Image (cartoon, rainbow, N blue to C red):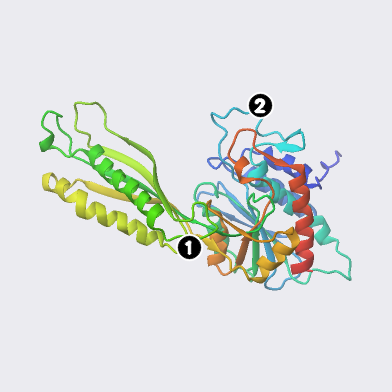
């Protein structure tokens, strides 16, 4: 009988296995989840899977330690952004060592943290009798963080099955192992404009969807300037105010036809003081009162429609929260920061789980060709997680 393949134990060994799976968000992640499930199962760790609606992707929630409420979760997503069109110097899905760096898609964002959490499992299972786990350690491994965060939302729906809700959570997004207390919210909208076509020589008989879209985009640009000038502002964020922008736009066919359709995508990134729903309503009210009346005067069927494509709540952990104090102590940080990018942390916090961000790697390396995490950062993460578990679950 052939021997089973050796079980990878170190963080780097596990990272090499994880990055070998192409889990770009457009793909299934089931092969990677099966690998982790098998790895945990060999060690007797029980876990729960939760799937997306068509069953092509899954979250994994494992719990190690006593069957009691509370404990701490280590959370990481395993989907990645694409490598298409990027100038990689090697195979993006094969881990390479180069001058103390570990290069691969997802090495930084954020399979490095997932690997570190998994590498901790054997130690958690073999703690001596005089140092037992008094609270459970949870592993949250999710899908689709890069596009919708639907994985985290689905995992949260299952947390009360069997009373398995942790009290605390560390989201290991790349932060150079510095604690992050807060991040902005994110609200993405696809806007479709319906016009009325005709010959461009008689523009008054049609409704130009591209020009209507351009009027709305001009408002977005003015609103961006207003937010930068008037705020509100919150220290620690860069920039310190909410932002709004248009990322893509399309419409029309040829020059001598009045375009009957246009589309653009826009996003808000909001500080905690701003309400993204109210900001979206402000935009819709402007369109309804200023742009659409002239459109409807020619054809009542014309106008704007909206589809929210992503809505990520912001996250804000009080600076004096015990979790913030512990993470600052263990990382040696003098303070905790704030970031403008979004994470799954806001969903966990809204579910009643005190959440902080702290993970290996620099966010500046995420999503780039030759993405990397340094071996030093992974070593710091390993040490941090061991001390964190001792402090909060041991």
Where residue 332 sits: x, y (%)? 74, 59
**Residue 393 seen in this snapshot:** no
Looking at the image, which residue is at 77% across and 34% down?
Answer: 99
Looking at the image, which residue is at 64% across and 63% down?
Answer: 169
Name the disc covering residue 272, or none: 1
Q: Residues within 10 Å of mark 1 (few under 14, many from 20)?
A: many
Name the disc covering residue 331, or none: none
Looking at the image, which residue is at 85% across and 63% down?
Answer: 127
Where residue 64 sits: x, y (%)? 75, 63
203 horizontally vs 350: left or right: left
Position of 172 relative to 200 (above/below): below
**Residue 80 seen in this snapshot:** yes
Position of 3 relative to 155 (above/below): above
Of 226 and 13, nearer the camera is 226
Task: For marks 2 and 1, give the CA distance.
Answer: 40 Å
Q: Residues within 10 Å of mark 2 (few under 14, many from 20)?
A: few
Q: Earlier in the sequence, mark 2 or mark 1?
A: 2
Where residue 156 sits: x, y (%)? 56, 62
92 horizontally vs 287: left or right: right
Place residue 182 in its image quadrant: bottom right
Q: Which residue is mark 2?
A: 89
Looking at the image, which residue is at 65% across and 54% down?
Answer: 172
Q: Quadrant of the C terminus?
A: bottom right
Where residue 387 sits: x, y (%)? 79, 61
Q: Quadrant of the N terminus?
A: top right
Per the image, label 2 sits on a secondary structure element best described as: loop
């Amino acid at each position: 009988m052939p021997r089973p393949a050796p079980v990878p134990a170190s963080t780097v060994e596990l990272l090499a296995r994880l990055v070998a799976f192409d889990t770009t968000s457009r793909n299934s992640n089931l092969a990677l989840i099966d690998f982790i499930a098998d790895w945990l199962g060999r060690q007797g760790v029980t876990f729960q899977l939760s799937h997306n609606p068509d069953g092509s992707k899954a979250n994994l929630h494992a719990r190690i330690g006593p069957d009691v409420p509370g404990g701490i979760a280590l959370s990481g997503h395993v989907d990645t952004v694409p490598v298409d069109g990027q100038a990689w110097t090697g195979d993006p899905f094969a881990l390479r060592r180069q001058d103390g760096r570990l290069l691969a898609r997802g090495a930084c964002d954020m399979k490095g943290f997932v690997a570190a959490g998994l590498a901790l499992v054997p130690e958690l299972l073999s703690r001596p009798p005089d140092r037992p786990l008094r609270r459970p350690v949870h592993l949250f491994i999710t899908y689709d963080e890069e596009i919708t965060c639907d994985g985290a939302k689905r995992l949260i729906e299952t947390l009360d099955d069997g009373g398995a809700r942790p009290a605390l959570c560390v989201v290991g997004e790349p932060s150079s192992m510095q604690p992050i207390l807060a991040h902005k919210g994110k609200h993405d909208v696809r806007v479709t404009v319906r016009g009325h076509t005709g010959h461009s020589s008689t523009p008054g008989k049609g409704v130009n969807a591209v020009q209507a879209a351009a009027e709305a985009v001009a408002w977005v640009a003015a609103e961006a300037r207003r937010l930068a000038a008037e705020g509100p502002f919150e220290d620690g964020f860069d920039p310190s105010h909410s932002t709004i922008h248009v990322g893509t736009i399309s419409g029309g066919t040829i020059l001598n036809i009045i375009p009957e359709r246009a589309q653009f995508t826009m996003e808000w990134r909001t500080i905690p003081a701003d309400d993204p729903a109210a900001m979206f309503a402000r935009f819709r009210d402007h369109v309804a009162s200023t742009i659409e009346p002239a459109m409807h005067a020619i054809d009542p069927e014309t106008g704007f429609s909206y589809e929210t494509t992503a809505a990520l709540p912001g996250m804000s952990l009080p600076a004096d929260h015990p979790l913030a104090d512990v993470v600052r102590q263990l990382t040696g940080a003098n303070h905790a920061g704030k970031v403008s990018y979004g994470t799954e942390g806001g969903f966990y916090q809204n579910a009643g789980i005190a959440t902080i961000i702290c993970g290996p790697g620099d966010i500046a390396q995420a999503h780039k060709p030759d993405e990397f995490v340094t071996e030093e950062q992974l070593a710091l993460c390993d040490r941090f997680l061991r001390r964190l578990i001792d402090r909060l679950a041991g």
